[in-house]
Image: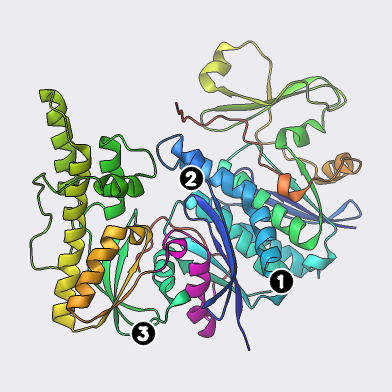
Amino acid sequence: MDVYILAIESSCDETSMAIVKNGKEVISLVIASQMDTHALYGGVVPEIASRMHTEAITMVLEETLKKAQMKIEDMSAIAVTCKPGLTGSLIVGIEAAKTLALMYDKPLIGVNHLIGHIYANNIENEMEFPMLALVVSGGHTELLIMEDDYKFKKLGETLDDAIGECYDKVARVLDLKYPGGPNVEKLALEGEHNYDLPHPVMDDTYNFSYSGLKSAVINLVHNSKQRGEEINRADLACSFQEVAIDELTRKVEKAFRETNIKRLVVAGGVSANKYLKGEMQKLCDKYEAQLLIPRLLYCTDNAAMIGAAAYPLYLRKEFSDFSLNASSIGDI
Amino acid sequence: MNTIYIDTHFKNLVMGYLNDGKLICKKVLNSNKHSENTINMLKEILEENKLTGDLIDEVIVINGPGSFTGVRIGVVIAKIMSYTKNIKLKAISYLQALDLDYDQDINIGISDRNGIYVGSFDKNHNLKEDYYYLTNEEYEKSSIKIEILDDQEVDIEKIYKYLEDKEEINPHLLKPLYVKKIEVTHD
């Protein structure tokens, strides 16, 4: 029998719902983005995000059902992102999901947002195991081996800042508007790698580090300003990006060499970065490995990935009870 | 007529079930985790009274003011119940609910750590001006007489009766009543 999951995602600044069939087919997906509002403040304001989720929640539900021409009665389960994210925002989605589960007597499935990003790769492609998974987002930078559905082995993670966070900070010192990451990427296209920036962790582990690189960029801009020197912003953006991504490719290359695994999935908001995609493709070509990166729609926050990640849990009947709560942290 | 009453605006989580305006069951829980407790409480109320979503005709929710997250929990639950099950939705502020016990001009206040939420009502329970928030400092300096009713319970049957002839709310449009401003600025 086909499994239809109604999935809800509200961990940051998108109110999103989706109906996903058998963990693979997106029957409908609605994303109400608050990006324009938060751009006014130069970043996501948590309280405003929670307020906007509350206002949008039933309208997003209506649109999701209408697009799919389905009813809640047709669903097999209700899935919701429960961690990690902004707790106030997560709670809006969680309470909505719990209310639906209670009103319609459906199982409730709490989903980890990061695992959702990984399963975004299962929507239009077929994930095969074992595979390497690189999770790169505003809050996380992790390299994992995935041996099977929901079977993770962490190789390494960031020791300080996440790569996405670092992009946002660099955007700020370069006077680029929110959302910072995509704007740094755009500016980098116009520049060349002319600035000598420190390479973060040159050790033999799988760990990452971004605070040193971030400080180096901030100091460089600051010192130039004090000396009254003009910074070539495009060159600095390009230099930063190449070093930041090189940090990822070095560790992924090490994993290819040492594990002999021939598949790589890249997940999380930063996977939308085209330079990152190009570098990972080169690496995969070199090691004759398969690269999976979701298309842009499924790279950024969306509920379809939550529906995809909920499916294996549904099959195993790993349901949540009504005490399900939000958490700002949520390791894989 | 089966009515569910939900109040998550402050520390006490309060829920009730009314049949034709008569309070059949009321639950109170001093909870600092409304997000873990509210749906469990609703489930208990439904089970104990042999109700399902399809048998509920009306939901009344306290839409604020109070803890931002707390208020949102009640409002989101009420919105989803109303929208999906086509349940009549009504909302009332906690200050207005307290005022139903007073047939005179009165300024009613409820306090949080930093100040007081105030509602000014006439003897017919009409709000005389928009709700406002006074910080503790502003309150000390002001000469306004405010009845601070932090420990007073509201009468759920009275709320039901007061709302009886009030129009129902479109669930898409129901918003929490925050009153207090948040401190962010932009260009």
User: Between marks 1 and 2, how big is the CA–CA gap?
Assistant: 29 Å
Q: Is residue B108 magenta?
A: no
Secondary structure under tag 2 reads helix
Task: Name the quarter where the C terminus of chain A is drawn.
Answer: bottom left
Farthest residue, direction bottom: A1
CB under 8 Å between discs 1 and 2: no
Tell if the residue under mark 3 belongs to the same chain as the one under mark 2: yes
Farthest residue, direction front: A190
x and y, in percent, of residue A17 in the image:
58, 62
Q: Which mark is residue A128?
A: 3
Q: Is residue B123 above or below residue B141?
A: below
Q: Is residue A243 visible?
A: yes
| Residue, disc 1 | A70
Tell if the residue under mark 1 belongs to the same chain as the one under mark 2: yes
Secondary structure under tag 1 reads loop
| Residue, disc 2 | A35
Residue A103: which quarter of the image? bottom right
Q: Name the residue located 16 percent from the left edge and 26 percent from the top edge.
A: A225
User: Between marks 3 and 2, how big is the CA–CA gap?
Assistant: 34 Å
Disc 1: CA contacts within 10 A as few (<14), some (14-19) or many (>=20): some
- Between A157 and B71, the one lying in front of the other is A157
CB under 8 Å between discs 3 and 2: no
